[in-house]
Amino acid sequence: MSNDRPDSPGGPNSPHEGQGSNSSGEWWDQPDADSFNTHARSDDASLDDDSSDSIDAVSVGGSDEGLATGSEMTSASEPDPEKGQYAPDDHEPDDHEEESSMAQEEQPTDNKRRILAWLGLAVALVVLLPVVVFGVAYATTDVPEPEELANSQIAVIYDRSGEKEITRIVPEGGNRSNITIDKVPDAVRNAVLAAEDRDFYTNPGFSLTGYARAALGVVTGNSSAGGGSTITQQYVKNAVVGNERTLTRKAKELVMSAKMAREWTKDEILEAYLNTIYFGRNAYGIAAASKAYFGKEVGELNAEEGAVLAASIQRPSALDPWTNRPEAEQRWNYVLDGLVEMNIVSPQDRAGMQYPETIDPALAPKQAPEPGPAAMIKNQVLAELEREGISEQEVNTGGLRITTTIDPTVQQAALDAMENYVDQSTGLRAAIVSVEPKTGAVRAYYGGDDPTGWDYANSGLQTGSTFKIFALAAALDQGIPLTAQYSSAPVQSGNVTLHNDGGAGGGVLPLYESLKQSLNTPFIRLQRDLKNGPDDTAKMAHRLGVAESIPGIEKTLMDDNGHSQDGIALGQYLSRPLDMAVGLATLTNDGVYQQTHFVEKVENSKGEIVYESNADKGDRRVSKAVATNMISAMEPIAGYSNKPLSGGRPSAAKTGTTQLGDTGQNKDAWMIGSTPQLSTAVWVGNVDGSALYNSYGGIMYGSQTPGDLWKYTMDNALSNEDFEYFTKPEPIGGVAGAPQYQAPSTSDSGYDQGYAPETTEEESAEESTSESSEEQPAPLPVPGGDGGGGGGGIADLLPIPIPGGGGFGGGNEGGGDPGNPGGGQ
């Protein structure tokens, strides 16, 4: 029986025409196709009867032996007594047996064909699907022109409601003047190519190997697996797709780069790139960068200057020669070496090139800033975003929507207070900061109206007697109770004799009374009883949230030798209004510090959240006993200073002033105070640091204009809020809290002295390693001192030497403008 198919092993083209093969190497007649199919179907049908095992045996066996069906084997073979198995028959196989065997031999071949077909389909999908997706994306995607990018780059800052706009972040690129490529000197163009894309004019506009490296980095989590982006890809990334490290973003970048490379000329691509890329110093585009770095038009740049600009593209802020000359020069040399490699600059000319000087960034042209305090809030927001890893470039190009913590009601209360109580035309200035104790969110921030001037809320200022709260907190932390008695007589500190305002005092008073009357000398004596003296006051202030460094001061609250002087309790060192609001907020929150923040969340132009503040349980900085006793000692002061909150709302407060040298006049006046919902610090001073006078022409104290600002802000900020009460004090040294000043109250809640009911809930914050000692000593014996009358009113300071000045508040510590109090901004 023969098979005439040319592709058959037994066909006319086969070396064994008319024969088929079995596994033992023998050849037999091949059945025709119809016969084969018939038997194949017969075999399939037999799977329903008892012959399935035999069929399996045939399929696996593959030799002449055992090709009979199960029924034939049973009837034709008997067990061999000697071998213990069935002996094969001696008869020749008939045609039916040969055809059945052939059908089984062809089954593996048929399976292979099916597998190959599926593999072919899979390969086709793998190859064709990306092509189809690429084609669709290519057809539906447009690459924006540089002039289309300005509005999409603008970030908007909102208040906490997410509805009221505070200000906008408009980069230089938002108002850029695009220039044509012919206006850019060849030397500058070539420098950019040497820095970013040396084969720009010959490459296809995208790098598949770079994409593969980036994809591998995404899959493996290796952020250092660079993508090797071309200039075309960089433009697309900055213009549209952003910096997100995902395969989707990189694929979109690849598609758009391919389209741009096909539809734009190389000069058009380079022109668009040079008009939009960020060079640092808030300069977008080569024209703005030329003025920001060299104060000249781009057409006036030489090769060395062009290389400086090109070198900055990789990391604009980090490679600014004004702040990081070594790394900037290293990158500059890389650019020049590239020009030599590209045969644009000769080695001889390269050797003679010198690094050019750039102008001070402060002298670089800037856009007109927005008026009012919004500029100060924007600066705080930008600084916080940078700390959280959101780059300046992302802020300036991402079209971000930034929701801040600023509460419109609290902020407006602060602004209205300024309008009502501060006549800035006379040179009077003020700062108001409100922080929510439970979250650390800044609810109001006012540092001044001049956007290019001093931000007083963020400036180091002498804090006066407000700093006594940290000395007293340190004492409570070491087990000294509020009832400990200290002399108010004059006390010697170095070569200076310290006494109280107006010469008051001379008697012995408990600490809570000395705090209320703001006597100076008891706190000098108190600090000397602390384990580490005045240093413990500094440590306590830092624990509670006062910054350890501020602009212009690397280490706050100490001298160059690392130690603090007696005068720290009297406000000798510089702190910011922001710090004072935060420190008091921690005490108000039962000793639990919450990270201070201005930003609630950030969304990109697609509405995706790229950053969100995570309010946690906070960090316990002092025990609840220390915090609640401290607040208790501060509760009488607002009423004592004639500034109780409306309706008898419970508050904890402290006033303070600092003297102008030895003039007897004050130059700084403060009031800080809190409720459980809000902690607010207020500072008042003159723009030139001169003496402060009240509306009657007398010396200004903290209970006057600062007190007015504080009370107005707090009353109006909380007017629609329920009364909340401080936590009842826990005992220290057998004493819990201080006697309360009985301010008028409309509350009939039944709370004891304005305290909330005791709670058994576990405190949510982690206990810090600096927790106060479990063992608290009994009240200390009364220190020695001459007896006599009580203290005076709200105390001020008498001269104490400070670095850089002839008396308390007489210097300009921090290297700032002598015409502005506090030094560095």
Image (cartoon, rainbow, N blue to C red):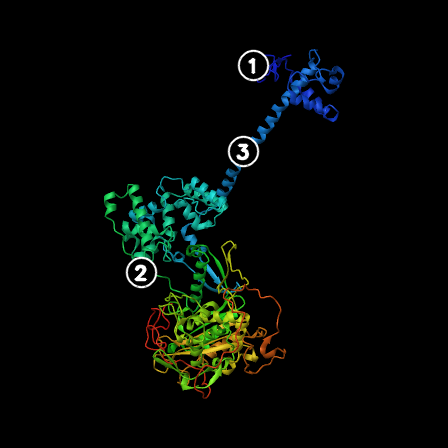
Residue ID for mark 1: 14
Nearer mark to the viewer, of 1 and 3: 1
Lower position in the chain sequence, tag 2 or tag 1: 1
Q: Which residue is mark 3?
A: 124
Query: Disc 1 on helix, strand or loop?
Result: loop
Q: Work out whether 513 lies above or below 613.
A: below
The one nearer the camera, 713 or 761, is: 761
With 493 as the anchor, is 13 left or right in this view? Answer: right
Identify residue type, mark 1: Ser
Q: Classify mark 2: helix, strand or loop.
A: loop
Which residue type carries mark 3?
Ala
Q: Earlier in the sequence, mark 1 or mark 3?
A: 1
Q: Nearer the viewer, residue 115 or 668?
A: 668
Q: Residue 540 in the image: x percent, y percent? A: 46, 70
Q: Is residue 447 visible in the rendered structure shown here? A: no
- Comparing 151 with 197, the one in front is 197
**Foreground pick, 531 / 629:** 531
Residue 737: x %, y % from top left: 55, 77
